[in-house]
Image (cartoon, rainbow, N blue to C red):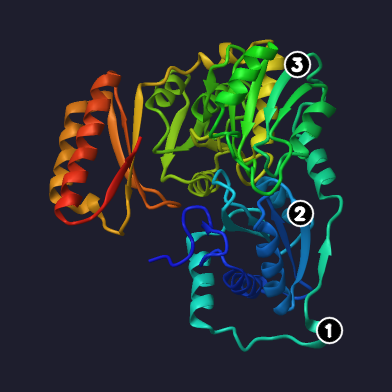
Amino acid sequence: MRKLFGTDGIRGIANVDPMSGEMAMQLGRATAYIFKDREGRHRIVIGKDTRLSGYMLETALASGICSMGVDVLLVGPLPTPGIAFITTSMRADAGVVISASHNPFYDNGIKIFSRDGFKLPDALEAQIEELIFSNSIDSLRPTAEEVGKAYRIEDAVGRYVVFLKNTFPNHLTLDGLKIVLDCANGAAYKVAPAVLEELGTEVIPIGVEPDGENINLDCGSLCPQRVSEVVVQEKAHLGMALDGDADRVVFVDRHGNIVDGDHILAICATDMANKGRLKNKAVVTTVMSNMGLDLSLGKRGIRVVRTAVGDRYVVEEMVNGGHNLGGEPSGHTIFLDYNTTGDGILTALQVLSIMVSTQKQLDDLAKSMVPLPQVQFNTKIDREIDVLRMPKIRRKIKAIQRELGKSGRILARYSGTEPVLRIMLEGEDEDKIAHMGKELTDTIGQVMERMGRDTHLQG
């Protein structure tokens, strides 16, 4: 059983265990110990988003790392993929991101990249947990000149801007495009507008005034309706909404319609395949992606490879299988030809390059995929209990799948970041699958009620 790490690092309420300064310091010590595995001076990058608690955790992490004789490179607010890039480009031993992604400001999280820019595998996270809870490195304390130092990398934003611009084809520009850009008052509030403007875009910015408490507040990728309204009002060509750490992006076409990660995968996979750049003629995504993606890409001879939920599992499969495109419907899209993790700004540039080179609007490109109706329910379970193993609930799930047959599916899984059971159904008849989902959540509620447990339906 994991004690700290979930599907995307460690996450929780800031200043409450495990997101406390004390735990961050211990995490810094354990991380530094893990990556002191070669000769010479060692360095670990620390970056963050714009949350108020980032200051507290940044200081604690840096203290722990320095106490193990490892230097710290502080880059300040920078998108998660930017920290992965800085880690590899500066030949650091590891990179640490302080961010709770799309969560509200009072949450925070910590995730770690290895020196090659990839998120840590489960085994290494388990090793870090063991070091922390066994207290086995408490006595390891370098002294005198062996204590680590902390340096601030002043040009981190500029380095990342140059990197992103270099992923956009040199022979193209974005002159004449009007784009509504929502940075979620998060880590990309400086970088994203700078990149688009330098490539010729007229940017209408939203969410670029962070105050430590307004990250993801009624803005960003979880609230694309705001961008949709502004796109229509301003007669913009499209809009895009990043999340708090800018590793994902959700698009809005010129009519205000939302274009999610599945559509983006279909657009990019088709373009890359046409150019002979899609490795293995395959795309990697999670079990949450719509079956419409399989159907649309299958017509073009492109396979869809599925993984467990979480962009880290998508990346692992991409590396193991030799693939170069993957992502999630939430807007995480990974282009391994350019970076090692999901990158919302990089994804935006790839989509924009396709629009410019094909001279097609986003809504026209998005027609390449027709999604099946999909409904989702979140059942909040206040106490830890594996309801999916209960016979009555298992029988209900099997009965639903039999009724759906090959024209639909049901997926029930526990969230890796919240005490929530997520239920997703797909099928040809939206009313029918909505009724099925409601029946299942009612069954779960009845079972939990008999056990004296509390549940709460969100959705």
Secondary structure under badge 3? loop
| Residue 145, numbered circle | 1
Res. 337 image quadrant: top right
Residue at numbered disc 2: 76
Residue at numbered disc 3: 177
Give the Cα distance between marks 3 and 2. Answer: 31 Å
Q: Position of residue 360 (x, y in %)?
A: 65, 11
Residue 230 visible, this angle: yes
Please identify the quadrant where the N terminus is shown.
Answer: bottom left
Q: Position of residue 77 (x, y in %)?
A: 73, 50
Residue 271 visible, this angle: no
Label 3 or label 2, whichever comes before in sequence order: 2
Count neighbours of disc 2 (C-alpha within 10 A) and say few if under 14, some if 14 to 19, many if 20 or more.
Answer: many
Q: Position of residue 89 (x, y in %)?
A: 78, 52
Res. 289 image quadrant: top left
Residue 221 vs residue 373: left or right?
A: right
Residue drawn 71% across and 21% down? Answer: 179
Disc 3 or disc 2, which is closer to the eye?
2
Q: Position of residue 176 (x, y in %)?
A: 79, 13
Residue drawn 82% across and 27% down? Answer: 197
